[in-house]
Image: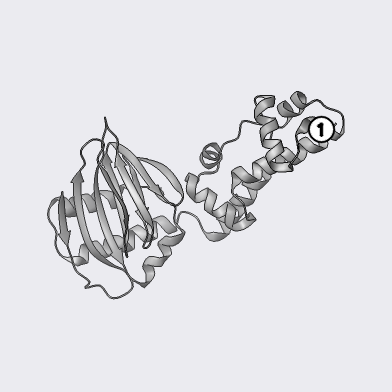
Amino acid sequence: MEQIYLGKTGNGELYPLHVGHYVVPGGNSYGPFVRDYYVLHAIHSGKGVLINQNGSHEVSAGEMFLIRPGELTTYVADENDPYEYVWIAFSGSRARQFDDMPDVLNTPEEMYAKLYEHVINGEKSTDPYTALLYEMMYSLFKESSTEEQEEIITEVHRYIKYNYAENITVSRLAARFGFERSYLYRLFKARYGVGPKEYLTRVRLEKAKWLLSRGFSVSECAFMVGYSDAFTFSKAYKKFHGISPSFEH
């Protein structure tokens, strides 16, 4: 592992603390650990898993994963295809804008190339890294405005409401609407009070209750609201409504 300490020499808004490069042994785990600054890890090759309060996230070459202050995180390299990455740790008053970013992001190619080159060449001046942080922040935040995100989340909500019988997963929703999985969850829950998976369950089981009241069988209801089998449907129905669907007839 190669690490370069830069020190707190920024202007207070956004400044780098240290950078580094690591070729990780297969299966190597780091954490659980809590930091008091932000860290972006940019994956050069290989893959692994980031584990934080939002769950488990697969990361691979061409992606970055973000660690925020106060978060308990662990990251684990794949056993057969471990990752190699460079990182930049930073702080400052403007760094808080990263709080609303996804846990895993696509790496802006030009920004990554600059970071990788600086670190591999042993650059110790803070100026190139500070400039890079501002470039990176602009590149990441310009991708979608708050208003655009609100419109997309409304579309996600509408899609679930009218397509609940389809084979919907959070991962498929994220891919369909152009969000990282955990970021979609965070935005959706902030807007509607529940995650997209919980909302899908609610829509399905409220619709199932209505169908049962119209005389449809448990098996028919399970199929019509998107469950693959009556047993899984019945278990979910009882947990949600407090009564077995067989007693609703």
Direction from residue 200 to residue 149 in the image, left or right: left
Kindly give the residue lying farthest to the right in the view shown.
214
Element type at mark 1: helix
Q: Report whether residue 153 is seen.
A: yes
Front residue of 70 and 135: 70
**Vertical arrangement, residue 240 with respect to residue 34, above or below:** above
Residue found at x 56% / y 40%? 173
**Residue plotted at (65% across, 31% down):** 166
Q: Residues within 10 Å of mark 1 (few under 14, many from 20)?
A: few
- Left or right? Give the position of 124 relative to 73: left
Q: Mark 1 sits on what residue?
A: 247
Residue type at numbered disc 1: Phe
Quarter of the image holding residue 201? Answer: top right
Q: Nearer the viewer, residue 120 or 185?
A: 185
Q: Residue furthest left?
A: 122
Which residue is depicted at the point 81% across and 32% down? Answer: 247
Q: Position of residue 97 (x, y in %)?
A: 42, 64
Give the residue drawn at x 28%, y 75%: 11
Residue 1 spot, x, y in % from top left: 15, 48
- Asked if one can make out residue 162 in the rendered structure from this viewpoint, the answer is no
Q: Classify the position of the C terminus by image quarter.
A: top right
Q: Is residue 105 left or right of residue 87?
A: right
Could you tell me residue 120's position as x and y percent?
15, 50
Which residue is at the far bottom? 11
Location of residue 193 in the rendering, given as x and y in whole percent from the top left corner: 63, 56
**Left or right: 37 as drawn, with respect to 206:** left
Total residue callouts: 1
